[in-house]
Image (tube, rainbow, N blue to C red):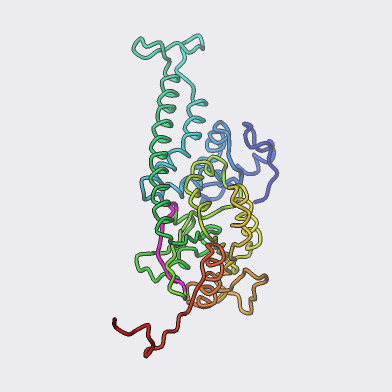
Amino acid sequence: MVLPTKTPDRKLIFGKETLEHLTEKIRGSKEITAVFLNVERMATPTKKELEAAWGMRVFDRFTVVLHIFRGNARTREARLQVALAELPLLRSHLKNNGAPLDGRGRGSRYIMGSGESFLQVQQRLLKDKEAKIRRALERLRRKRLLLGRQRRRREFPVISVLGYTNCGKTTLIKALTGDAAVQPRDQLFATLDVTAHAGSLPSRLTVIYMDTIGFLSQLPHSLIESFSATLEDVAHSDLLIHVRDVSHPDTEQQKASVLSALRGLRLPAALLDSMVEVHNKVDLVPGHSPVGPHAVAVSALLGLGLEELKAKLEDAVLRATGRRALTLRVQLAGAQLREN
């Protein structure tokens, strides 16, 4: 249902009549088991009031995306980033639940004579937890930067693969590298970590493909902050690939969301200007023809257009890194092959 709302962070998100109409509809249908409000964040009192009125869980964009992230976090870094993203929600619950009150309505209970109220103790514990998570993430970030420097010392060009969530990035990397260990999944935010996969271009130049977290329109700000470290690797790439699902009805809006997020990362202009745009899933869009010099149509699942894409990637990588592909012809009977 499309309905007008008041400010989401106020307690009353709907007008009285609208709320009564919604409550009647939701309570009257046994098929409805949860309600999703398409707002970034609801205030905790709003959430509690609506759940009490409707008798079921109520979600906003933040809690839905966080739930998906939590389910897909497999590495230590991803779990730490999810834990960091959860802290604003925990603080919000703590603030609205309040501290134990005495009969006169003032907070007066302290923990074991420490001089701290229950609320203050909980706030301090959350602050300590945040500091601990940030220290752990910083250690992992330094390790990742060290690995990145080692890759650059070995002179492997790095290609970062970006795109809206569930556009087929991982499937494309598997098709380009032949890496059997890569297991694409048809779900949102299946990739929460940056993973590296070796592949080779037509000249047999070895490159590293970096699989990154997917983008999402109106991704809650605290989640962007939590996962910004994951995207730091993108800035150190030699080339970017923007994978688009051209079969999706909102493909143009998805493209705009990704480009907006990339601009927010303050990437070098040359890196953005040289980005290759891959129009994926063209097998589902008969007659699709990409527009623009940097665009290539492929079907990563069926292997269509991959040779053209590899040729374009090689050309772009050679330009970005100052390399040249040379063909040397040596006569078998020539002096170069004679023994001394």
Seen from the viewer's position, the closer of residues 76 and 220 is 76
Q: Quadrant of residue 135?
A: top left
Magenta stretch: residue 195 in it?
yes
129 or 5, nearer to the observer: 129
Q: Is residue 117 above or below residue 4?
A: above
Q: Main secondary structure of the magenta part?
A: strand
Q: Total number of numbered labels? A: 0
Q: Classify residue 339 by image quadrant.
A: bottom left
Q: Taking 50 as reference, is 164 above or below it?
A: below
Residue 333: say if magenta.
no
The residue sitting at the front extreme is 340
Q: Is residue 59 visible?
A: no
Q: Residue at x 68, y 46 (%)?
A: 3
Left or right of residue 21, residue 59 in this image: left
Residue closest to the eye, 151 or 39 = 151
Q: Is residue 265 visible?
A: yes
187 to 265, vertically: above or below: below
Which residue does the image show at 62% across and 34% down from the upper left? 9
Image x and y of residue 76, in percent: 36, 45
Closer to the camera in the image, 163 or 97: 163
Query: Magenta stretch?
Result: 192-201
Where is residue 274 drawn, in percent x and y? Answer: 61, 62
For residue 269, above or below residue 128: below
Q: Where the C terminus falls, by quadrant?
A: bottom left
- Residue positioned most to the bottom: 333
Residue 38 position within the rendered picture, expressed as x and y whole percent measured from the top left: 61, 47
Horizontal side of 4 relative to 212 (left or right) equals: right
Expressed as whole percent of the image width and height from the top left, the position of residue 231 reads 50, 49
Which residue does the image show at 37% across and 50% down from the upper left?
A: 74
